[in-house]
Amino acid sequence: AGRLSFSDAEQYMMFQAGANSIFNGDKLLTTDNPAYDDDQNLFNKLGFEGKPAHQGPLVSPAEAEGNVLITKVSAHNDIEMQQCA
C-alpha cells in the first residue's frame, strides 16, 4: 500500500529486496492505488512477469533445471520425494 508515493526506481528496489506481490485495484481501505495500466507499464519496463490470479506458482529456474528436491507430505505422514528433471 502507498506505492503512489514511491518512484519506479524505489519500487524496483523493493522487489529486489524481497517484495513479491502487490495489491491492485482502484483503492485500498485508506489509500489510492496506481492505475492497472500504470502497473502493467511498470512491470514491462522492469522486465517482471506476473502470474495469473488464482493459479499455482510459476516454476523456478532451479526447479526447471532439476536442481530442486521436492518433498510432499501427505495427511498420513507419508513422505514422497522426487528429483525434478
Image: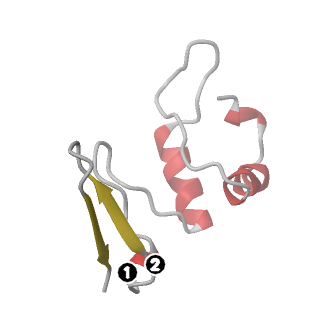
Q: Position of residue 71 (x, y in %)?
A: 35, 63
Q: Amino acid at mark 2?
A: Pro
Along the horizontal axis of the image, is 67 left or right of 29?
left
Residue at 49% across / 52% down in the picture?
40
Q: Are marks 2 and 1 in contact (CB under 8 Å)?
A: yes
Q: Amino acid at mark 1?
A: Ala
Q: Position of residue 69 (x, y in %)?
A: 40, 74
Q: Position of residue 18 (x, y in %)?
A: 67, 53
Along the horizontal axis of the image, is 79 left or right of 68?
left
Instruction: Say which element carries label 1.
Output: helix
Q: Which one is nearer the viewer's eye here, 82 or 63?
A: 82
Tell me, for residue 50, which label it has, or none: none
| Residue at mark 2 to residue at mark 1: CA–CA distance | 5 Å
Name the residue carrying label 1. 64
Along the horizontal axis of the image, is 7 left or right of 65?
right
Name the residue carrying label 2. 61
Residue at 30% across / 58% down in the picture?
72
